[in-house]
Image (spheres, rainbow, N blue to C red):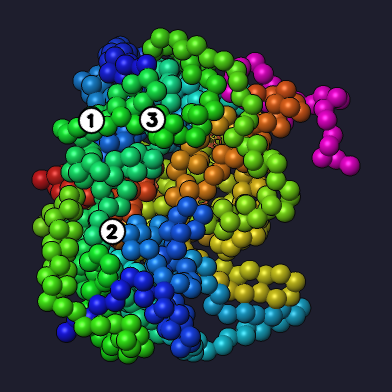
Amino acid sequence: MASIINKDKVAELVKKVSSSGCEVFGPVENGGVTLFRNLDGGIPSDFTNSKKPPKEVLFPQTETMFDFEIDGSKITALVEPVEAQTPILMLGVRPCDARAIQVLDALFTWDYIDPYYVNKRDRATIIGFSCTEPHMPLQSCFCTSVGGSPSSKDGLDMLWTDIGDRYLVESFTDKGNKILETGGNLFANAAKDDEKKTEDVKKLAESKIVRKLDTEGIEKALEATFDHEYWDEFARRCLGCGECTLLCPTCHCFDINDVITRGKGKRERTWDSCQYPYYTIHASGHNPRPDKKHRQRNRVYHKFLYSNKNLDMLGCVGCGRCISTCPVNIDIIEVVEGAKEAAK
Amino acid sequence: MTDYKALEKQIQDQARQWLESGEVKYVIGFEKGDNSPVCRPVFIYKPEDAGKLAWGPLCNNNLTKYLVEEVQIKPKKGEEPDLRPVGIVVKPCDSKTIVELMKENIVPRERVKIIGVISEGTINPKALDKALKDVPLDKIAGIQILDGGDNFTIKYDGEPLSVPKDELLNGKCKVCVVHNPVVYDIFVGDKVTQIDKDEFEDIADLEAMSDEERYEYWKEQLSKCIRCYACRDTCPLCYCEECVFDRTKPYNWNEKTVDLPENFFYHMVRAMHLAGRCVDCGGCERVCPMDIPIRKLNRFLLKRAKERFKVVPGINVEDKAMFGDYDIDDPGEGIK
Ligand code: SF4
Ligand code: SF4
Ligand code: SF4
Ligand code: SF4
């Protein structure tokens, strides 16, 4: 049975949840861009999707893994076990980004359980917001082509849908029910009419998605075109800036570095991108992916081939960030369609 | 008022002619995106493809980055390098970068044939996105933009929009004083009258701030930086084969850590590396995914270079590079 919450009650809910000792994150306007940051009140209902995906709550751009001390030639690692701390609430996650978190879940528990990610993930409750205006800059959303939708509930504990002065609230998990409990009388039962409106909003949003990608036959096409000159053609204009990967909600590569200052050090990991030449360079100086074509090809193969093979799910959720952000209009839909064409 | 279609035709004709005669290896220009209204870089190798070349106010990229790539390619062992020039389409601001690249002996004049096109301003894609909020999503890729004097007219199969230029123009275009290409083989368009009116009004507010206020301003802005280095990667004057920020041996100058101190360090070092060189093509600010007003730093540099050293980069190949020249009368305010 669905519930509703009035928009003017959301700030109160956030306060209630925070005072129960939970850290709340949501989309916040920050120097002109929307980012997932600590919330101390409500959130706007019409926020455009965050520039940096909400993955940064669970997988921060830079994260300290452990500290160490250096005394002459003696190095002592101060490794603390990663232990559960306060619960986390992520409010206002778009459905594509929630599906991306499922990809990260699979990845970070695949061949090795990553304690840093898993610890935060276990503590997190994710409340999704249906998109009513699926409109990344210049119409680049295509979630419906890769198994999602503007109101997909995959990976979510709750889904809220904007129906005017209130949200229709659906809860799918115990974590979601817990929020209903904490909110108490801030939530009310949904009326038949609210549910009807919700269906309409969801349908309308879905009809607004204009970009489409036919995923049929992609894997075969990619396998057949590894050495095709096609990759050279379009990658030539790539700047190698890595925006498409750093801002992608499913990208998860990181680089590990030691930062040392006067006898103290910390081992950190920081997001990295396969679009950078330094990503693959070997100690010998040899680089197995020397050119932009190799690096662009890797991005596409990872999302549409390797991810399927290793994790049994597509590595792209169609959020459109890479398309709308690329300074030279490299459009992943066109790139994949082009590879299919080249394979013919 | 610019007739974009007429200029486009001249660009295509010139490119076709050069490719037919074999005078150029290929032409770097713009093409219209298939699924987006913006124009994007394209490389034209065959005369029959010259018709793909597009021109309009959404030709934003500074293509000279690819010129640098071309001259930096190392020929494979035993291969005779093809040193024929490449053709390139440039806006006035982009032509200024070519001047700098020639001054710094990076691009020899004979390696490039320049189609220099006049420009009265280009459109910022983010601003365009806002202006198109009521246009049906499936119509956006097909819009057409015309110059309507003080307005841009946006045509699609619906009621055309008329948007004041001020709302759409890139920040750099609002203060630009060079509307004609400064170096070219072929001049495209009718010469635009230009007045040197650059009083740096756009940074007056920042200059009026106290040090503390200015620190707060940059703190807010630079804490957003994700250090993707897109600003560097798009900048034609950032041509070092190994950038200090990628270097890890003998040690990192800049930690990989993405936090405020390291972000400040990155931007300060990059600004210093561009002092007296940056021509304000605006590329860095346009590609920044986090909307950081990087140009404000560059404008500070331009102003100081002009006031203190009488240097205006990107105008004359015969000028000495600011850091390559010494005069006993140079102001020494930095050295006390
Ligand atoms: S590849 Fe692009 S569209 Fe797909 S999830 Fe990543 S950023 Fe979004
Ligand atoms: S955002 Fe575009 S230019 Fe930058 S690395 Fe990705 S594809 Fe290349
Ligand atoms: S483009 Fe923007 S976010 Fe990227 S490094 Fe430059 S200033 Fe930072
Ligand atoms: S720093 Fe920015 S404005 Fe200056 S030349 Fe480079 S890209 Fe252009």
Task: Examine the rendering and report whether any part of residue A183 can be seen.
Answer: yes
Labels 2 and 1 in the same subunit: no
Q: Is residue A153 left or right of residue A241?
A: left
> Which of the 4 image quarters holds residue A90?
bottom left
Left or right side of A166 for B330? right
Circle 2 SS class? loop
Vertical position of residue B327 compared to residue A193: above or below: above
- Marker disc for residue B160: 1
> Three-letter amino acid code at disc 2?
Cys
Q: Are marks 2 and 3 on the same chain?
A: no
Mark seen at residue B164: 3
Q: Which residues are magenta?
A: B313-336
Q: Which mark is residue A319?
A: 2
Disc 1 residue type (three-letter): Pro
Reply yes or no: does residue B326 show up in magenta.
yes
| Residue lying at 15% horizontally and 67% vertically, measured from the top left | A197
Where residue A10 appears, as percent x and y from the top left, is 37, 74
Residue drawn at (39%, 80%), measured in percent from left and top? A13
Q: Residues within 10 Å of mark 3 (few under 14, many from 20)?
A: some
